Amino acid sequence: MKNYQLRKTMCATCPFRPGSPYENLAADLAASALSDASRICHSTGSNGIHARTGLPSHICRGARDVQLSVMVALKVIDALTDDAWNEAREKVGLPATVVADPRKKGAKRVHAK
C-alpha cells in the first residue's frame, strides 16, 4: 500500500469546490472515496484530466474532507481534523499521512521567517 501525501488545501478546480468545472464528479468521487480508496487529486500525478502534471501524486483534499465527515459521524475519529485521522491510523499500525501541498520536483520549500 502506497502512503501518498495529502493535499493541505483543495486545488483550484477540485470537484468538491463549489463552482468547480468538475463539480459534477463530486458525488461519484465521494462514493468511491468511502467504498474503495482515497482519491488522488486530478491536479497531481498522471491522470485522465491533465495527463502528466509534473507534480507528485497527492490525496485529494476534498475527498478526504468527505471521509473525515463520515468517520466523525461513525465515531471512528472524534474531530474533523487530519490529526484525528492520523491518530486513528497509528492505532491500527498504519503510518501517519503527511499533509502538504504539492510542489514541482526540485522546487525548494520556502520557510516563513
Image (cartoon, rainbow, N blue to C red):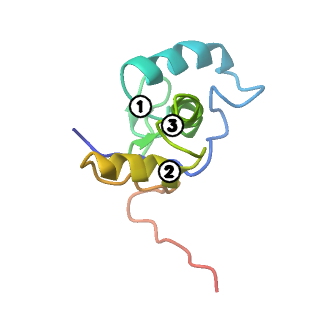
Q: Position of residue 93 (x, y in %)?
A: 24, 49
Quarter placement of the C terminus: bottom right
Query: In the rendered view, does 10 fall on the left or right side of 36?
Result: right
N-term-proximal mark, 2 vs 1: 1
According to the picture, the residue beneath numbered tag 1 turns out to be: 38
**Cα separation between marks 2 and 1:** 16 Å
According to the picture, the residue beneath numbered tag 2 turns out to be: 84
According to the picture, the residue beneath numbered tag 3 turns out to be: 60
Choose top left, top right, bottom left or bottom right for residue 98.
bottom left
Judged from the image, the secondary structure of the residue bearing numbered disc 2 is helix
Choose top left, top right, bottom left or bottom right for residue 15.
top right
Q: Position of residue 74 (x, y in %)?
A: 52, 28
Q: Residue at x 21, y 38 (%)?
A: 1
Q: Position of residue 14 (x, y in %)?
A: 62, 32
Disc 3 versus disc 2: nearer the observer? 2
Q: Nearer the viewer, residue 1 or 50?
A: 1
The amino acid marked with disc number 2 is Ala
Q: Nearer the viewer, residue 31 or 22?
A: 31
N-term-proximal mark, 1 vs 3: 1
Q: Residue at x 62, y 42 (%)?
A: 10
**Cα separation between marks 1 and 3:** 8 Å
Counting every numbered tag in the picture gives 3
Residue 6 appears anywhere in the view: no
